[in-house]
Image (cartoon, helix red, strand yellow):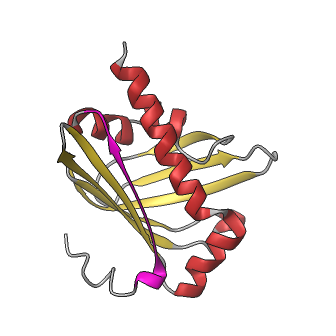
Amino acid sequence: MNIASLTADSAREIVTSRQIAAPRELVWQVWTNPAHVTKWWGPHGFRTTTSEFNLRNGGTWRFVMHGPDGIDYPNKVVFLDIEEPNYLNYKHVGEDDFAHILFEAIVTFEPRDGGTFVTLRTIFPTAQERDYVVENHGAIEGAKNTLERFETVLKELSNR
C-alpha cells in the first residue's frame, strides 16, 4: 500500500483513531462483516442498511445511512486494496443526491497494548471538499461516534 501521495496535504484529511480492547482478528471481523457493520456504522442516532457488500479488491459496498431526522443518505464504496487483517483502502464515490461527496479512506488495524489500534483516515480531493463535509455533515464528530459505536459492539461480543 502506497499512501504517501494521499497524505501529502493534511488539510485534506480527517484522521480518527481509537484503541480497542479486542484482538485484531475479531476487530477485523466486526469491521468487515455486514451483519456486524449494520450495528455500528455511522454517528449516534443513525442506523445503516446494506444492500451490497462484496469485500474484495474492486468490490462494492452499497448502503444507506438513515438519519435520526428521517433523511436517508445513500452511499457507495469501492474497495481498492485489502490486506486482511492489516488494512482496508476504499474510495467513497457517493450515490444519488450525495454523489458529490468523494474521498478515499484507509482503515488500519494495528496490534497494540494487548488490543488493536484502529485508525480511520479519509482523504478528500481538496481542502474545500473536506471542509464541506465537516461543516455540513459533521464528519469529524461522525467519525468519532462511529468508532465509539464500533467499540461498543466489540465489547458486547467480547462479553458473550
Q: Which residues are magenta?
A: 10-22
Horizontally, residue 141 falls left or right of residue 82, namely right
Horizontally, residue 139 falls left or right of residue 24, namely right
**Where is residue 86 shown, x and y percent of the image?**
20, 52
Using the rendered image of the protein, determine whether residue 84 is visible from the camera's viewpoint.
no
Answer with the quarter of the image where residue 74 lies: bottom right
**Relative to 6, does residue 37 appear above or below in the rendering?**
above
Q: As drawn, which residue projects farthest toward the right? A: 69
Magenta segment, principal secondary structure? Answer: strand
**Where is residue 6 shown, x and y percent of the image?**
33, 80
**Relative to 110, does residue 93 appear above or below in the rendering?**
below
Residue at (41% x, 82% y) in the render: 10
Residue at (36% x, 35% y) in the render: 30
Query: Is residue 140 located in the magenta-colored stretch of the structure?
Result: no
Query: Is residue 13 located in the magenta-colored stretch of the structure?
Result: yes
Answer with the quarter of the image where residue 94 lies: bottom right
